[in-house]
Image: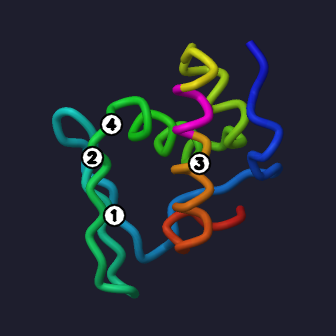
Amino acid sequence: MSTDPLLPTGTYRLGDDVVLRPEPPGALVYSHRLRTLTVLRDGDLAAGVQAVDRGLTPAEACAGLGLDPRKQRAVGRALRHLIASGVLVHD
């Protein structure tokens, strides 16, 4: 299965000020610096964020989830948004 070519390359991790708390069915992400709470309502997205935080690239994380291409693009878009908002930072 191919990955989304628009996914950022390189490795990312959760920002130093970010806490991720797994919750059914997804996770809560809190940024102390921005004072924002993000609710990840999708278990696949939460798993993707955790995989990226463990050192996988966004493309590797999406490919490793075994998602259909449509769902993979949705998770990829969400990961790009988390990178743009500073929740995930370049490692």
* Mark 4 surroundings: few (<14), some (14-19) or many (≥20) residues within 10 A: some
Query: Between tags 1 and 4, which lies in front?
Result: 4
Give residue 17's position: percent from left, percent from top: 42, 77
User: Gap in Å between the C-alphas at discs 1 and 4?
Assistant: 17 Å
On the image, which quarter does residue 45 sit in? Answer: top left
Determine contact: label 1, label 4, CB under 8 Å: no
Q: The magenta stretch spans which residues?
A: 71-75
Q: CA–CA distance between discs 3 and 1?
A: 21 Å
Of labels 1 and 4, earlier in sequence is 1
Q: CA distance from mark 3 to mark 4?
A: 13 Å
Residue, disc 4: 42
Question: Relative to the observer, which residue lies in front, 28 or 2?
Answer: 2
Residue 19's mark? 1
Q: Amino acid at mark 2?
A: Ala
Badge nearest the viewer, 3 or 1: 3
Task: Specify which label sits upstream in the sequence, 3 or 1.
Answer: 1
Give the x, y percent position of residue 39: 26, 56
Tell me the CA gap for discs 2 and 1: 10 Å
The residue sitting at 33% across, 36% down in the picture is 42
The quarter holding residue 58 reads top right
Q: Secondary structure at mark 1?
A: strand
User: On the image, numbered disc 2 is attached to which residue?
Assistant: 27
Mark 2 neighbour density, 10 Å: few (under 14) some (14–19) many (20 or more): many
Asked which secondary structure carries label 2, the reply is: strand
The mark found on residue 77 in the picture is: 3
Which numbered tag is attached to residue 8? none
- Label 3 SS: helix
